[in-house]
Image (spheres, grey):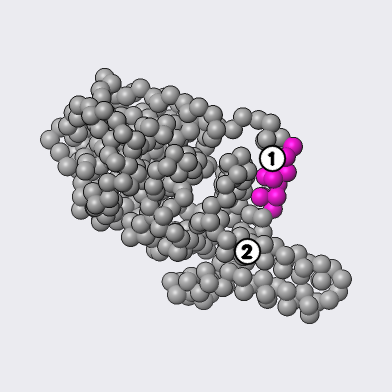
Amino acid sequence: MAITVVIPVFNDARSLARCLAALANSHLPPAECIVVDDGSTDNSASVARRAGAFLNHSPRRMGPAAARNRGAAAAQSDLLVFIDSDVCLHPDTLGRIQARFDGDPGLAALIGSYDDEPESPGLVSQYKNLLHHFMHQRSRRDASTFWTGCGAIRRAVFARIGGFDQRYLRPSIEDIALGHRLRRAGFRIALDTDVQVKHLKRWTLASLTRTDIFDRALPWTRLILRSASLPNDLNLSIAERCNAAAALLLVTLAALLAASGRWAFASGSLLLAAAVPARFCRFVARKCGWLTAAGVAPLHLAYYIYSCLAFAAGLLLHLVRWRWQPDPLFATAPAAPATRRPQSPAPAESTAAAPARRQAPPEPPRAAASLSSHPKRAPKTMA
């Protein structure tokens, strides 16, 4: 099964160069690599051209959801692989993805995981990236969500489901919302823990909390409440919900005890709170040592606490505001952007998609220099 890799980028030329270099070293070259330049003002477009990728340029910033849709509309392969511009594929990543889909015709989509060796050495970056790895490695293999850090989906299924909702104008939960719609439509998503990528992003405390609260927790809470669905998976597993509630209660209790002068009891409550993320801290200790584990413990406690508070704020907003407003998730999906070639019939859907009349196969994939399995033609640019 041929693969098209779609990479949206916005002012991230340095990471994009690393991303494309890793893709060029893949044991299985993709049939085509499409980089969607989402209105960048740096030299991201030049980086894509030099690497031999097909450049799909947007004159203005549309957001990653619309950028991915634009890349998917230009793709010709039967299998779409979405990755971010700040990740590096492992050499075997594409081969593992192809093998899973070739061996399971009923599989509609697949997600992977960050590896356990994040690029940035900072404490916050190590914490955030290792936490993602930890969650994905221990979650259900029958996934309830999609993930664009490294996610694959059959092109026919992606078209049928309507693509990403373009009303998410900044990086948010557009991938989670897509996964929710896939599951509602009866499609199956798998989590393969051996499909891994390295994350290059450098996190700061400010960017971490801002992203977790405003780009993840609040919109995800809205999705949960509007859909009346709370999956027992990943960050929302029952164990994680219990951990978050315990952390909030114990830290609140410690604050109340300290305020009343009962310092011994307050210290005991904090010690109990510090034990809540013990399993994750042991994992970090094995990877980075106990000093780093001691540093991530308060970060993880803070994560639990502000996640609970964000959910409470989201519930309040739902009661007084959101429930009366239309939600992008439940509205009609926007029309797909125009393709870079005349519209041709899509290939017949696999058993993962709904039955469809057999149609003419697509034209052969175009070249993408070192990023393509057909390197004879020069890369092109689409305005």
Q: Is residue 43 left or right of residue 369?
A: right
Which residue is denoted by mark 1 in the rendering? 318
Q: Quadrant of the N terminus?
A: top left
Q: Residue furthest right?
A: 260
Q: At x 29% / y 30%, what residue is drawn?
A: 356
Q: Residue at x 32, y 42 (%)?
A: 352
Name the secondary structure under disc 2: helix
Q: Which of 58 and 178 lies nearest the eye of the viewer?
A: 178
Q: Which mark is residue 242?
A: 2
232 to the left or right of 140: right
Query: Would residue 3 be visible to someone looking at this image?
Result: yes
**Residue at 70% across, 50% down:** 312
Question: Residue 99's x, y, as percent?
Answer: 24, 52
- Res 136 quadrant in image: bottom left
In the rendered image, residue 115, in percent from the top left (x then y), is placed at 38, 60
Q: Main secondary structure of the magenta part?
A: helix
* Amino acid marked by disc 1: His
**Mark 1 closeness class: few <14, some 14–19, many ≥20 residues within 10 Å:** some
Disc 1 from disc 2: Cα separation: 23 Å
Does residue 229 lie above or below 348 as drawn? below
Q: Can residue 119 be seen in the rendering of this structure?
A: no
Label tally: 2
Residue furthest to the left in view is 376
Towards the viewer: 306 or 103: 103
- Which residues fall within the magenta stretch? 309-320
